[in-house]
Each structure stands twice: as C-alpha cells, then as structure tokens.
Image: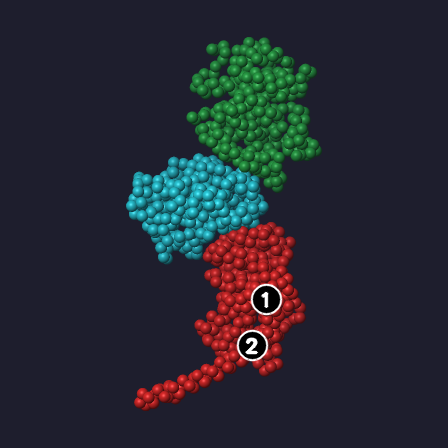
Chain colours: A cyan, B green, C red
Amino acid sequence: MPFSRIVYKPEYDELEKKALIIRKNIVKMIAKAQSGHPGGSLSCVDILTSLYFRILRISPKHPKDPERDRFILSKGHAAPALYATLAETGFIPYEWLDDLRKIGSPLQGHPDMKKVPGVEMSTGSLGQGLSVGVGMALSAKILESGYRVFVLLGDGECQEGQVWEAAMSASHYKLTNIVAIIDRNGLQIDGCTEDIMGISPLGAKWKAFGWTVIEVDGHDFLELIPALEAISYTSKPTAIIANTVKGKGVCFMENNVDWHGKAPKPDQLEEALKGFEGVEFMESDEVEVDSSN
Amino acid sequence: MSVDPVFIGIAGDSGAGKSTFVRDIAALLGRDKVRTVSFDDYHSLDRVERKAVGITPLHPRANNLGLAIEHLFLLKQGKKVLKPVYDHSTGSFGDPEWVVPMPYIICEGLHPFFFKSLAELYDMKVFYDTDLELKFNWKVKRDTAERGYSVEQVAKEIRLRQRDIRNFVEPQCALADIIIKLKVSKNSSSAIGVDWKEPVDDPWIKRYLKSCNFDNWQCFTEWYAGRKMNVFGVYSDLIQDQLKDMGSIFSIRQDVLSKIKEKEVVPYRTMLVLFAARIKQIRAFKDKDGEVVFKDAV
Amino acid sequence: MTIISDREIATREAYGRALVELGRQNNNVVVLDADLAKSTQTIKFAKEFPDRFFDVGIAEANMIGVSAGLAACGMVVFCSSFAIFATQRVLNQIFQSIAYTNLNVKIAASHAGITVGEDGATHQSIDDISIIRSVPNMTIIVPADAHEAYEATFAAANFEGPVYLRLSRMATPVVTPPGKPFEIGKAVTLREGKDITIAACGIMVYEALGAAEKLSGLGVEAEVINFNTIKPFDRETLVESLIKTRAALSVEEHSIIGGLGSAVAECICEEFPVAMSRMGIRDQFGQSGKPADLLKQYQLTAEDIAKEALRLLETRRKANEIYEISASTKSDFGALESEVDGGIPDENSN
C-alpha cells in the first residue's frame, strides 16, 4: 500500500535481475559442492525473490527481531536457493556460498536454523514445515503480534500426511496470518507427481481444507506479488499454488527430472553459466553475521 | 493490447440502489465490456472485527482505501490486480479474485472518491442519492432476504448509521460530476421520480438534451453542497419513441433496455439512458483521443 | 528412608496440577494435546487457560510441529499424549523439528509402560526411553511419584531445551517428600546399603524400596537409587554407590533394551565394571490385564526384584569362585613357566 511503503521496494525489472543472480549462484554453488538439488532450487527462485525483496518484513541487521515475518523452507532440499537469497539479502556473506555442503560449513545440505542467520527452521525431512508454521502463526495470535508466516512447500511434499494435518489445523484455528506457497513444478525424484502419486486437483484439496486458494504463474512477479500481498485481506489461511518449471533458467535442466538431485559437471556448468551472461554479483554492504546461537 | 478504461465512480449509502443501477448500466453497455468493482470488498475489517472495534463500515477506517487506490491505479495502467472479496452473507472475506482492465470499470461503494487521490482517478463521479423513505424500504427488503438480518436489526442499523453517513459518505457529493436523486414521485403514474443534478458550470445534460431536441425539458437551479446545480426533474413519462431517439445517438441497445426490471418505471429508465449515453461519450472520446462529440457538432 | 505417605497419586495428575500453577506464573506457557486431554490431565490447564491450550486433534505429528513453531517464537511448550504416540509415532518430527533445533518443547507423555493395563500392547509404551535416549539434545525425566512429577514439571519448564517427561497412568504410592526442588541430571539415593545397588526409575522406585525392605530381612542391605533423570545420566552417583556395593540391579517399567538398564550397563562397562542385572520387559510385547497383575506377569514386583537381587549376588559369588580358581591355576602355570625358563624370578608373584 502506498502509505505503508516507507521501505524501499525494488520494481519488477529489478526483481528479475535479482532472480537471475540468485539462479546463477545456485548453479555455481551446487557445481562447486558437486552435490545438491538444482531442479527444485531453481523452480522456487522467483517465489523467494518476491518474498525476500517485496513481501517479508525482515532486516538482516536484526535477524532475531521478534516482530519479523517468518519464512520456512519446508522443502528443505531447495536450501541452495535459500542460501543464495540470504546472501543477496545480506543475511550471510557471499563467501559462505563457496562452502556449501562442506564439513564444518554453516551451509548444510539442508537448512539448519542454528547455523545460518535468517533461517527460521531446520528442515529437510519433508512435510514438517507447515506444522511449524502453524505453531508460529498461533504464537503471533497469543502474543497479539502482527508478524506473518510464509511456508514454501514442494508439490511432491503434499503427499505427506502431516501437511494435511497442518492444513486442517490452520483453518481450524482461523489463522489469517499464514501463507502456504506450493512450488508446483510437477516433478519429484521418481518422476511426474501425477504418475508417482497424483495430487491433483491440488487447489480443490486446499480449498476443501478451508484455505483461500490463489493459483499463479510461479515465475511471474506480476501474479506472485499480488497473490502474496493478498494475505492482508482474507479471512482464511492462504494457499498459493505457484505453477513453476523445475530447473527454470538452465535450459538443459528445465522440466528434466534427472536434475532433481544431481550436480552439474564442469562442462555442464559452463553451458549453464552461458545462460547468465552479463549477470554479475552485486556488491552489497558489509554483512555482520550474528553467530551467537 | 492495453486498455485505457473509463473509470466511473458511484458513491452512495448502502441500500441506495447502487448495485441495481450498476447492473442495469452494465447491461446497457454490454456485460463483456464492463467490470464492476465493489468498494465493499475493500472493507479492512470483517463483521466480527468491526463489532469488536465498534465502528460501522461507513467509517473510512473500516476500509482499506489505500489498497483501493493502489488497485485502481494499477488498473488504470492496464495491469491486472488481485482484489479482495467481501462476502456479505458471512460478513467475512472470501477468495480474492483477479480483475483485468476492461473498457468500462465501474466502482461503486461507500467511499469510492473519499480521498482526493481517489477522486482524481475517475473519468466520472456520480453521487447516488436516494430518499430516506425509499432507501429504508429497499434496505429492509435486501438485508433480510440476502444478508440474514432481521427487520429490527436493519432499522436499528439505519438509525445508527445516519451520523456516519453525514460525516463520511455525503461529503463526497461535493466532488461528484452528477448527483442522481431518487425519490418518491409526486406524479402518481410511477412510484419513483428522479432528479438529475449537474453543476451549472459543467452543463453536459443541457447540451445533450439540446442535441436531442429536448430543450423544452425544464430545469431549475439550486445550491447544493456549495455549488450551483441545474436540476432536471424526471417525473413525467417520456414516450417510448423519444426514449428510443435519445438512445440511438450512442447506440444504446433497445432490446436490453426493454428487459430492465424497472422498465415500467420510466423516469428511472430515462435516467439510465442518459447515463449510458454520457459514459459512451467518454469512451468515444478516449478511443478517438479527441473532442467530446455532440450531435449538433457532427 | 521409606515411604512417606500411603496416599496413591498418579504422576500424570501431579503433572496436570503443576501445569495450572505454571500457567499462572508464566504467560508464555502453552499446552498442546492430541485429543487425550482428559487422560493426560492437560484438561485442567485447558479449563483455566483456554487461550493457551490447543487440542490439535488426533494428529500427533502436527502437534510436534506446532509445538516447535510455538517454541521458536519464544513460548514454553508442553505437549502431551500417550507415551507410545508421543514417541514412536513422531520420532522423525521430534528428531528434526525439536531436537535438531534444540527448541524449548517439553514432551510430557503419560500412560507409559505396561501399567496402562487393559488397553493392551498397542497402547503400552515399552521403548519410549530407548527411542528418545538415542536422539541428541534430548533430556529424559522419569519422576518416581506424584511429588516428583509436580516438581519435575517446573524443572522442565525452567530448563532451556527439549525435555521428555515420562508419566504413568496408574495411581502409585508417594515415595519422595513434597516440595523438594527437582534437580535435572541428579539421581537421588533413597536408601543406603552396602550389598547391592538397585537403580530404579518411575513407579519401579516404590517396588525397589519394597524389595530392599525384604532383602534387609534376609540380611542383605540394598542401596536404592532413584534415577529420575535417564539422560543426562548421573554416572557419578552410580559409581560412588558401586564402589561400596560392587553389584548393580536396574529396574524399570520399560524394555531392558535401551532404557535405564542400558544406561546403567554402559556406565558400568565404561567406568566401573561390576556384576549387573537388568529387570524390565524382556524383549516382548505387553498385553491386556489389570496393572497389578501385569506387573506380576512381567516380574516387576518387589518380590521379583528381591529374588533377582539374591540371584545376582549368588551369581557373583559363583563367578568369583570360578575366577579365584582360574586365577590360582593361572599362577600355578606361571610358577611352572618360570621353572621351565630357568628360574627367572616373577616380579608379580609376590
């Protein structure tokens, strides 16, 4: 809203640029680690970009501010996307990205809230993030606090029963401060979600569980951002089904299930980076990392 | 293709007959060309919350007008917006819906041009004023049937609302281009009479009627909300041919016109035709990017 | 020290009362339950603080996740269910969302062990300690009676980090004084003795004390230690006692695999090897029956403990005899060897 927008918010073309930088860093860090999950990381980049640069009320200078918005990456295997976004937002230094998945590195294969500032919940085993989100949203209600909770789930993750336990409880407690974003890239490790264990019609399922459902193109900021802002005017928890392309941004990874959990070889990295030519690291201010916990 | 929509704002108290009016206008203009945005959807508090805070929806604080400004602004730029949806039957919010720009966007509600920044967005602003007696009858009818209130509740609510109406809704008439006043007709031939008021210094209807050779239509002037207004009283029946004649200038569809519910209420229908004509003219102006066209000028 | 009162109170009831008191003292205490509020006694809290009580329905996994979320936002969370559902069913959730994150969630599980009784094996949790003990960051508290359960609830609330609190359904005799502050990680010696150490936890402490009385009549003085905290395990108290008694008997209403028995065995092997025996559920499932009958069936009464203590002491005596024989034969061989080698004096022989 124009009145409340005191904080600078980048325009859409700037967001596109941010997303490209994040994509480039994801590919680079996974190639360097020689392990990781590029497919699901690349598919959710635009969602993370919208959240971190337009929606979330957070500050890298105060990562523990009790009034901050909470974001939970329930599909923890997309950790590289989260790390690259946190680096771009200024929560962690860029150098950390080089040590992804290395021994002693804070950047674990799946996010660890104790090691990385800006990570709100340790995830990895799928299906648990939304429950945690419900807990956080409930706590906002008890504390009469205004923060909001955003949870990013994979579409394959919706096969987990706990997701629906959590969905049921969010609408039961009438939580209007929680958003579940489903990264609907249509693929899981073993193949298409609809072949492995069909979850369609996904929107109708969430609706039946008492959620407001908004379906958007998960790579279009013009749809993503209004949908994420819609949290301020619903009487129900909001589920955003973001239709995405797995491996988006790297031509040979797009919609290819083989790239769920495989790192690119050096020649493949070179090919992938061709797609990001002209995209450069942006120098951000010096980052102070709060490693007290 | 980017659309530069014609923005029409219709302000008026709840139960003034706005929704009916908008529906009929939309039918006249062609439903595929019109998008109605109800400002009721921009309530920032649901019924329970309003009760807790102790304000009526008439209070601007109970409405998210900032969001409305943003949405209208985006629509004006030809971008789609995700609009909240307020469900009157439950008093809470439903699933938001996408609004894509259309040739005509009609915004109706309690505060469509409450702020100057809002008022500036419209191509035409209408204050829809309805006689209290009429309003009472309509509101009781609607709220008991569709929104689940009892008659006593409605009567009590109307009483409680009067102050907020004076404070927050009525002042908007000072910004309106047209004031449409519905009242109980003095003429026995139909129940509703319509007063069409426009500022003396912006006499569209006068010119229009002249172009239709209706310059025998008498009007008087009065001071209203600090402005001198021409008031055209539509009480007597205009004969069908005259109506047709008036409409034909801007190709108002006769078949649709004849289907309108209140077709027996000729003053209302006359007013609709006039209104549609005016909006179509603005559309034509935008499309041709030129002068306002009148028959006598063609 | 013997039994303080003849009154029988279930530990879950004390927990329920403690929660209400906690709720009054601390506005950040939140309680969750999974449709067992009446059984776990969280209903008392629910009645007084409906805004801070959440019954998540029959969805334990979600309950653990929601607890983690609440704790991550600064709440002190107690979540309750039957022990079997609060551990086995949600192990991965506890592992990832609570233990790995070291969040302030207290899992207070009632209806532990076979004394659940008539509900049978599906509801009798006999491996919860074992499961939780293997999860890093977890603290395990097993109160011996209602007094201890009451204090333990407060101790758990004041403790930073995840806690597993094991409670029982059955009303059991009180064996500890009321109002004694609970110290996490410190075992309590309830009865001193010099002949055998009985390490017990939960409702078995009462049976162990009974066994000690019986043994005393037979001239055997047993030391009874109440291991109210299984993890971190108080090795110091155990070893100190073992230096005196040189025999250990662990008693628990839990599988002998992975629970208190294992903790004691690990300590003994690594720190002070002595004779030891474990009592508990012997790698089998429970069954329906009256709690008292079940305790008899699974040999967990005072008599059984006394019998086992005597058996252990007898076994140790026999073993010592064999050891001595073998030791003397060995020294004979040694003498023989030295003779053969040509009279090199054996330094150790004197």
- Residue sitting at 51 percent across and 62 percent down? C131
Asked whether residue B7 is in view, the answer is no
For the residue pair A155 and B188, the one nearer the viewer reads as A155
Q: Mark 2 against mark 1, which lies toward the viewer? A: 2
Residue C249 in the image: above or below residue A10? below
The residue lying at 42 percent from left, 26 percent from top is B1
Q: Looking at the image, which is closer to me, A39 or C28?
A: A39
Q: Is residue A117 above or below residue C198?
A: above
Residue B245 is situated, as x and y percent measured from the top left of the image, at: 56, 11
Task: Kindly identify which residue carries mark 2.
Answer: C309
Q: Spot the residue most to the right.
A: B152
- Residue A267: x percent and y percent? 29, 45
Q: For the residue marked with disc 2, what is the amino acid? A: Ala
| Residue B57 in sight | yes
Chain containing the residue with disc 2: C
Q: Quadrant of residue B175?
A: top right
Gap in angstroms between the C-alphas marked 2 and 1? 26 Å
Mark 1: amino acid? Glu
Location of mark 1 (residue): C148
Q: Which structural element holds mark 2?
A: helix
The chain containing the residue under callout 1 comes to C
